[in-house]
Image: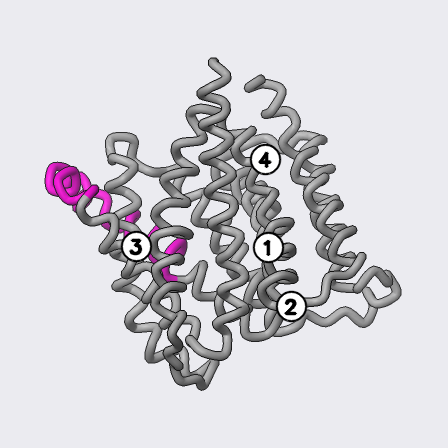
Amino acid sequence: MSNKKVLVGFSAAILAVVLWSGNFIVARGLAKSIPPVQLSLLRWCTASILLLPFAYTKTKQQWNLIIQHRRYLLGTAFIGISLFNTLLYFGGHYTQAINLAIIGTSASPVFSTFLAAIFLKEKIGIARITGMLLCLWGVLFLMTKGNWQHLQLLKFSTGDIWVFLSALLFAVYTIMVKKKPAPLDATVFLFIIITAGTLLLIPLLWIQPFFLQQKMIWTPNTIWIILYLGLGASVLAYLSWNKAIPLLGAARTALLGNLIPVLSTVEAVIFLGEAFSNIHLISSIIIIAGIIIANLPRLKKEI
């Protein structure tokens, strides 16, 4: 592979990671002004509209295939679009953006590994088990604030529970994506699940008040933030990520995803003024090391 292709691949993957890292900052930064369901609805509706010109023709061509797999597509849309980010945004009401990023990006690979072993019959090697244990250690280190005596008194905060549920759903979504019908175009697939997921969010507007009472407050920056979420964190991030995978390979691309909690932590300190402590630094290092170790066998195969 030429150096130019590798450079393009790394650039595309890093762009996606940077765009995704900001999602955790938005989840925390807009917690007091936009309710979770409305924020998800605005994000994915914007993404759907932006994707429409690129997916319209192919969607018409593959409409029969879409109808044939409608149950699978609706299920994937509900879990990966309607619920995943909405629960993350709920978590933003109760915990720091730093915690959102670290817990959210470390718990999901652990869940994904176990679900893949159960439902896809994928083997779990020693390296992956070691990596998962390190990830769990990092999360516990964060939640106990570095004092292991707190384990016996450990209680999950409301925000932690929402984020863990979000991570679990993203893991389920990841498994479901692996079952995507091969003939279905990738852009069409993304457009359909985003559009369906947006529509499925509407009933959640009536359910949300049972969990959270909040009115939406529009600010001068709201439109720009929604555009960032719809165009940046949704359309551009997914397209960039998909561009990187064939150029770098899945394993090397996935490893770059571990930069998300690091970038989110830096952004939370800069933009939200959140305190950064040695606890955050150490837990981030432990978690990233764990995920790298878990992916080393794949990395060696692709190299």
Residue 279 locus on image (x, y percent): 79, 58
Whichever of labels 4 and 3 marks the residue nearer the N terminus, that label is: 3
Identified by mark 2, the residue type is Gly
Which residue lies at the image location 39% right of the left edge and 35% below the top edge?
Answer: 242
Mark 1 and mark 2: Cα distance apart in space: 12 Å
Residue 240 locus on image (x, y percent): 40, 38
Residue 60: in magenta span:
yes
Quarter assignment of residue 227: bottom left
Dot in front, 4 or 1 = 1
Q: Residues within 10 Å of mark 1 (few under 14, many from 20)?
A: many
Identified by mark 4, the residue type is Leu
Residue 185 locus on image (x, y percent): 25, 35
Which residue lies at the image location 29% right of the left edge and 37% below the top edge?
Answer: 186
Q: Nearer the viewer, residue 216 or 185?
A: 216
Which residue lies at the image location 88% right of the left edge and 65% below the top edge?
Answer: 149
Residue position marked by numbered label 3 in the rendering: 47
Residue position marked by numbered label 2 in the rendering: 273
Residue position marked by numbered label 1 in the rendering: 264
Dot in front, 3 or 2 = 2
Identified by mark 1, the residue type is Ser
Q: Residues within 10 Å of mark 4 (few under 14, many from 20)?
A: some
Does dot 4 land on a helix, a strand or a loop? helix
Identified by mark 3, the residue type is Ala
Q: Residue furthest top?
A: 1
Q: Is residue 64 left or right of residue 34?
A: left
CB contact under 8 Å: marks 1 and 2: no
**Mainly helix, strand or loop, the magenta region?**
helix
Does dot 2 land on a helix, a strand or a loop? loop
Does dot 1 land on a helix, a strand or a loop? helix
- The disc label shown at residue 255, or none: 4
